[in-house]
Image: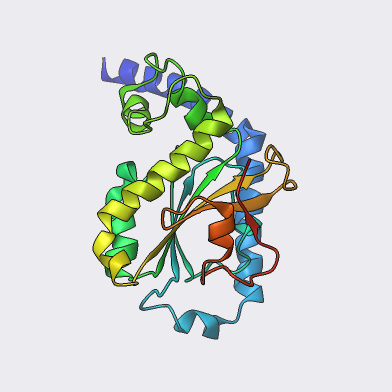
Amino acid sequence: MKKIYIALATIFAFPCISYALENSEVKTFLKSTFSDNAKHVQEISHENFKSFAEQQSPRATIVSCSDSRVQTKAFHQSPINDLFYIRNIGNQIKTAEGSVEYGIDHLHTPLLLIIGHSNCGAIAAALSNYSAETKATRTELDHLHLSPKIDTNQGVIENVNNQVAYALEKFKDKIAKNELVVVGAIYDFRDDFKREHGRLILINLNGEKDPAKIKQNEYVKGIEDIAIGVK
């Protein structure tokens, strides 16, 4: 009987192994990933790592959507040891609250940047009937409290503002002491807001949503190439 079990296990195991080996997308991805890492090792001086090998010192805590079309390269060319980056569906604080707290309370980043994006699938789901989703997915979507009967991009804007409002309340003591600034933005890879494809658009600064007033804020006044406000 034991031999039969072993034989059956072998029969069922080999097709799985064969399928994995034949999956060209996985192999291609792994090959490019480790190849890119090898280039990274060669191109960056090992001395550079000494400055943060024992301790990190990021300037910003980022909360963005997990969407694969939203990547740091779009707005930051040197994120290592500069961004404490948190990702989840719907770029929300509640489902990653401990991570956000760590960036602000333990790493003392002076900036919390919340980044939504055009045509967000999580927002579209939250605005529809998602009862057929798994419990884990429903739990995350349940925290996206949006107005009914709005379109997806309106929901994206509302959600970013909701997340900023949540952060303003949660970290109000630090904000009152000027130890933290909370910024809400939208990464528009579809040019839905007509500010050019791939533009990062600032829509909320410490609760202020009026573009004219934001432009006069000391934190952004005089900065070139900054897009503020959506229609």
Picture quarter with the N terminus: top left
Comparing 56 with 34, the one in front is 56
Number of numbered discs on residues: 0
Picture quarter with the C terminus: top right
- The quarter holding residue 120 reads top right
Comparing 230 with 184, the one in front is 230
Scheme of colours in the image: rainbow
- In x, y percent, where is residue 68? 58, 42
156 versus 3 height, above or below: below
Name the residue rendered at 59%, 62% in the picture: 215
**Residue 22 falls left or right of residue 194:** left
- In x, y percent, where is residue 93? 35, 46
Comparing 218 with 50, the one in front is 218
Name the residue rendered at 38%, 29% in the picture: 141
- In x, y percent, where is residue 180? 36, 67
Residue 133 visible, this orientation: yes
- The quarter holding residue 56 reads bottom left
Name the residue rendered at 50%, 32% in the picture: 155
75 versus 88 height, above or below: below
- In x, y percent, where is residue 227? 65, 56
**Residue 123 falls left or right of residue 153:** left
**Residue 138 falls left or right of residue 42:** left
- The quarter holding residue 143 reads top left
Comparing 42 with 139, the one in front is 139
Residue 91 visible, this orientation: no
